[in-house]
Image (spheres, rainbow, N blue to C red):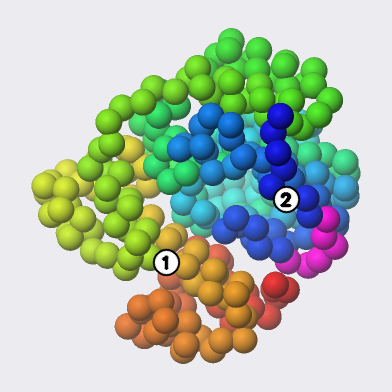
């Protein structure tokens, strides 16, 4: 039996959850379930129930996700799409380097999200991960008939925990574990330093040239190391804002480790699409 870690019902303008921001015009119920077997690879299974239609603002978290949607009505609006576009019903979401918008398309929709831990999706996906950058790719294109059977099993179940059982069982059979790589170690250092680490330093510790390291990092992680560092830095700033949104930009800048405010604002705006000041004015924590 899967145990739910949280059950949240919120009527708010802005909600921070799992390093992802949602701008809400409606009530959203969130249930979090934890894996029974794949806890070394999966952070959580999250079920989002949309009681009403409304735009949702998401920002990059630096992790891969697999998304199973109740209806083929979800749309997104991103920098790489031509306005609002229909999403595949079930898809793998690669790493994004800019925030974007999603709309469930109708009320009473839901989606189940498999949130991987950093740099673990590579053990399940038989492709080099850079091809998923800023993309959502139908699971049928990756896993074929087995993905179609999984979708049918999910649709046949009434309860979320039973749907998640099928998803985890499917992923157990797709797991192809290899030894920890030098990129895994680099990711650990990068996160420990909150993104404030030079690519040349990571390459040196990995015993690779900078160009070799960048190529291998992008293939394994799905995005360049410099972009990943920036995502981690911005997520660190959002974590501080969530805990205390009364801190000044100067305090946040130097607490994080930036040399000056201009560099912090530039990083933040490139990911979030707005300045830290504008973000704080719009947000309710």
Disc 1, SS: helix
At 27% from the left and 31% from the top, the residue drawn is 179
Residue 159 higher or lower than 29, as above or below: above
Whether residue 209 is visible: yes
- Name the quadrant of the N terminus: top right
Residue on which disc 2 sits: 6
Instruction: Examine the structure image and report whether residue 133 is included in the region drawn in magenta.
Output: no
Left or right position of 97 against 244: left
Q: Position of residue 79 (x, y in %)?
A: 55, 53
Q: Position of residue 240 (x, y in %)?
A: 53, 74
Q: Position of residue 111 (x, y in %)?
A: 73, 38
Residue on which disc 1 sits: 233
Q: Nearer the viewer, residue 59 or 49?
A: 49
Left or right position of 146 against 5: left
Q: Which mark is residue 205?
A: none
Left or right position of 135 against 14: left
At 60% from the left and 17% from the top, the residue drawn is 147
Front disc: 2 or 1: 2
């Amino acid at each position: 039996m899967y145990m739910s870690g949280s059950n949240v019902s919120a009527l708010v303008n802005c909600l921070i959850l799992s390093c992802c921001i949602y701008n809400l015009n409606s009530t959203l119920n969130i249930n979090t379930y934890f894996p029974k077997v794949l806890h070394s690879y999966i952070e959580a299974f999250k079920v989002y129930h949309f009681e009403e239609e409304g735009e949702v603002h998401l920002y990059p978290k630096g992790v891969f996700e697999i998304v199973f949607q109740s209806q083929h009505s979800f749309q997104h609006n991103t920098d790489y799409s031509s306005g609002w576009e229909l999403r595949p019903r079930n898809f793998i979401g690669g790493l994004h380097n800019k925030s974007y918008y999603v709309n469930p398309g109708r009320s009473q929709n839901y989606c189940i999200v498999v949130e991987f831990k950093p740099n673990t999706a590579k053990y399940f996906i038989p492709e080099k991960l850079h091809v998923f950058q800023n993309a959502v790719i139908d699971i049928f294109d990756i896993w074929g008939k087995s993905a179609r059977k999984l979708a049918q099993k999910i649709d046949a179940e009434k309860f979320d925990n039973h749907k998640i059982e099928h998803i985890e069982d499917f992923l157990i059979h797709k797991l192809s574990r290899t030894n920890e790589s030098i990129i895994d170690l680099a990711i650990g250092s990068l996160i420990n330093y909150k993104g404030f680490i030079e690519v040349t330093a990571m390459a040196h510790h990995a015993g690779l040239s900078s160009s070799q390291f960048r190529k291998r990092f992008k293939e394994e992680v799905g995005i360049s190391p410099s972009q990943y560092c920036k995502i981690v830095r911005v997520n660190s700033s959002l974590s501080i804002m969530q805990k205390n949104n009364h801190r000044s930009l100067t305090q946040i800048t130097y607490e994080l480790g930036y040399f000056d405010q201009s560099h912090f604002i530039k990083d933040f705006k490139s990911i979030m699409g707005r300045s830290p000041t504008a973000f704080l004015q719009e947000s309710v924590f």
